[in-house]
Image (spheres, grey):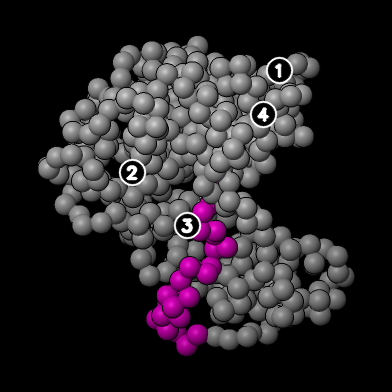
């Protein structure tokens, strides 16, 4: 099999893994963003893997599997052992040559590398590390590298992976032990969490060492992430959101990615009876979960606030922040002149950026002048979506508008769906 065929097969095999965006990482040489003199690679602190940065740039990542040969039979995975699909494997040198060549042609800014479990976890992990190590040392590559941690790999290998990669990830895939046992019987949740814990502990160790020692290498400076497959198992959104919140708290994850289950997607055989019979991926549900995740990470919401004990699923008609507002109308209206930053974040139509801008304007004004400097027109210029916020705020006691009742307000917000969280289509 020639290299072009391998590239076609293993790029297609990797497309279902959503956990590949970079965030908050600088170049290996520091703030300059370049590698070493004469080296390759530049990356901004934004993101890669066909994502859009805050300034609108599209940046791309070479996203591949080392091999799609796999001994596991995970029902939701196109690469499972029982799938009748073409199989292929790269060598480490082929991947190094491809990455460097694609970079020279300005096709990519980095590499995302995962693999099927074609052998013992340590063997597979060593192949991924060998590729990253060769890119850094032989290829002088200073661009972004995301490596997948293979659950069951030894502590030493996990630690070495973080010395060559910018981000590490180990995918949970399913929200509960019961679903793992049913749909991915060779996987063990305890082993997956153990790998996450090892990455987190090592991050902390290197951070502590950096406080007292001058020369400490970087360990996975973009942290770790994971992926959950949505719709392949019966868990509700509340279970998923609670799990994500726990992962952020316990393991310090940078991101949880949500991937809508694709039914019978090119598996080369009949649908697996273990899987739900659905016609299309639940992309709307995936989108709502991303919005809820945004609330957890940047809007200071707890999982219990996003979905309470009586509400198992996110609202399909309005975003999670608007849904919270309708359940807590007693919290409103929020007086913009006096409200804390945290309270401003609760207002539909006010995002994290516009809330900071409001606080900065107030800080630069005397208290009496704040009402004059913060007009409704000024709020619009600060980034507030007044079509949504107008029903939830006052300025010096003045409203723009009031909805007649909660039902009417829900209808209005449903009509404005998608404009409330200042969440880009491609988050990174």
Locate residue 79: give its quadrant.
Answer: top left
What residue does disc 2 label? 229
Q: Which mark is residue 291?
A: 3
Instruction: Judge from the rendering whether residue 397 lies leftward or rightward of residue 222; answer left or right.
Output: right
Figure quadrant of the N terminus: top left
Q: CA distance from mark 3 to mark 1?
A: 37 Å
What residue does disc 4 label? 40
Q: CA distance from mark 2 to mark 3?
A: 16 Å
Dot 2 or dot 4, earlier in sequence: 4
Q: CA distance from mark 4 to mark 3?
A: 36 Å
For the point 48% across and 75% down, the residue is 416
What residue does disc 1 label? 216
Dot 4 or dot 1, earlier in sequence: 4
For the point 45% across and 65% down, the residue is 319
Q: Is 194 drawn above or below residue 358 in the view shown?
A: above
Q: Identify the element where label 1 is drawn.
A: loop
Instruction: Judge from the rendering whether residue 7 lies leftward or rightward of residue 188; answer left or right.
Output: right
- Residue 181, percent from left and from top: 22, 31
Per the rendered image, the range of residues in magenta is 403-428
């Amino acid at each position: 099999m020639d290299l072009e065929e391998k590239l076609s097969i293993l790029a297609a095999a990797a497309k279902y893994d959503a956990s590949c965006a970079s965030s908050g990482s600088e170049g290996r040489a520091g703030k300059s963003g370049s590698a070493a003199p004469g080296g390759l690679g530049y990356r901004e602190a934004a993101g890669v893997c066909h994502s859009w940065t805050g300034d609108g740039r599209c940046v791309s990542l070479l996203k591949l599997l080392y091999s799609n040969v796999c001994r596991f039979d995970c029902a939701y995975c196109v690469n499972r052992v029982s799938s009748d699909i073409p199989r292929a494997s790269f060598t480490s040198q082929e991947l190094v040559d491809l990455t460097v060549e694609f970079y020279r042609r300005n096709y990519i800014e980095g590499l995302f590398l995962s693999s099927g479990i074609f052998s013992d976890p340590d063997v597979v992990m060593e192949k991924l590390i060998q590729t990253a190590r060769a890119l850094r040392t032989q290829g002088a590559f200073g661009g972004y590298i995301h490596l997948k941690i293979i659950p069951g790999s030894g502590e030493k290998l996990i630690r070495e992976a973080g010395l060559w990669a910018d981000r590490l990830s180990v995918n949970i895939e399913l929200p509960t032990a019961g679903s793992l046992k049913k749909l991915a019987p060779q996987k063990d949740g305890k082993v997956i969490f153990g790998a996450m814990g090892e990455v987190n502990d090592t991050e902390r160790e290197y951070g502590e060492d950096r406080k007292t020692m001058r020369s400490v290498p970087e360990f996975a400076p973009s942290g770790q992430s994971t992926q959950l497959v949505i719709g392949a198992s019966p868990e509700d959104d509340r279970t998923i959101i609670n799990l994500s919140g726990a992962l952020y708290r316990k393991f310090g994850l940078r991101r949880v990615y949500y991937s809508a289950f694709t039914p019978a997607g090119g598996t080369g055989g009949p649908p697996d009876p273990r899987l739900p019979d659905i016609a299309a991926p639940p992309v709307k549900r995936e989108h709502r979960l991303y919005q809820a995740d945004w609330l957890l990470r940047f809007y200071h919401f707890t999982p219990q606030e996003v979905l309470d004990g009586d509400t198992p699923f996110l609202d399909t008609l309005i975003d999670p922040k608007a849904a919270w507002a309708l359940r807590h109308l007693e919290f409103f209206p929020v007086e913009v002149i006096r409200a804390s930053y945290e309270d401003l974040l609760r207002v539909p139509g006010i995002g994290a950026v516009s809330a900071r801008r409001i606080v900065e304007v107030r800080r630069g004004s005397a208290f009496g002048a704040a009402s004059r400097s913060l007009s409704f027109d000024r709020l619009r210029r600060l980034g507030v979506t007044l079509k949504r916020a107008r029903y939830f705020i006052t300025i010096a006691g003045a409203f723009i508008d009031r909805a007649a009742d909660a039902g009417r307000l829900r209808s209005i917000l449903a009509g404005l769906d998608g404009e409330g969280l200042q969440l880009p289509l491609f988050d990174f």
